[in-house]
Image: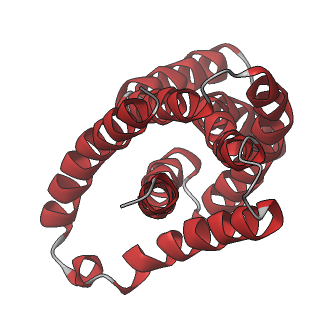
Amino acid sequence: MTLHKKLLAMFLFSGATALVYQVVWTRLLTLFFGSTILAVSTVLAVFMGGLAIGSALLGRRADRAAEPVRFYGWLELVIGLLAMATPLTFAAIEQTYILINARATLGFWEAALLRFGLSALLLLPPTIMMGGTLPVLSKVFLNQSDANTARSISLFYFINTFGALRPCACPWSSSPPSMRRSSLCKFLTRAPRLRKSNAISRGR
């Protein structure tokens, strides 16, 4: 299997894990906000904002990266570590909100804005890292004089988005909640390490 096909396979898997992260964050923030609409709106807003910021900031860093494949591997590792830390960071922002709310009288919108800000602190770091993955992988093909750059980048984007669709059709979604939580924990802990080790090994 060529490097191009291996990177496509990893980026497909990356898209699938990104959707799983979104589902987990939405479930947690639904408990935090007490409203599914506010939770989904927050996740979408911060997720898309984080992707934009990561693409801008890490895209510049990718231009200076001597080994973009290795850089991609480290990005995926950081994303995985931040995702695994979600229970701890979520507990921290929850306690912060309780402390602030106990010291100040907040109306509905003030409380909602505070929860949004705290949620952004939870979601921005991993989503910024996610935003940098496509520019970094694009750099791999910019370094190849015989590569059709436009086609390669568009294919990467398609594969990543298609990967995000796959969990939606998975029979896992109809399984009991306890089984889903157990599967999510295992998936979140194993997937990033596999992607990171594969990507870094390609950079050698």
Q: Is residue 146 above or below residue 119?
A: below
Location of residue 104 in the rendering, given as x and y in whole percent from the top left corner: 73, 18
Question: Would residue 184 appear left or right of 201 to someone viewing this image?
Answer: left
Q: Residue placed at 75% from the left, 36% from the top?
A: 54
Location of residue 204 in the rendering, given as x and y in whole percent from the top left corner: 41, 26
Q: Residue placed at 51% from the left, 70% from the top?
A: 164
Q: Is residue 34 above or below residue 161?
A: above
Of all residues, the one furthest to the front in this rendering is 146
Q: How is the image coloured?
A: secondary structure
Q: Is residue 24 above or below residue 86?
A: below
Q: Residue placed at 85% from the left, 28% from the top?
A: 60
Residue 97, quarter of the rendered image: top right
Residue 36 visible, this angle:
yes
Location of residue 33 in the rendering, given as x and y in whole percent from the top left corner: 59, 49
**Residue toward you, 167 or 149:** 149
**Residue toward you, 192 or 119:** 192
Q: How many marks?
A: 0
**Residue toward you, 34 or 54:** 54
Q: Is residue 167 above or below residue 62?
A: below
Q: Quadrant of the N terminus?
A: bottom left
Residue 72, quarter of the rendered image: top right
Q: Residue placed at 13% from the left, 64% from the top?
A: 179
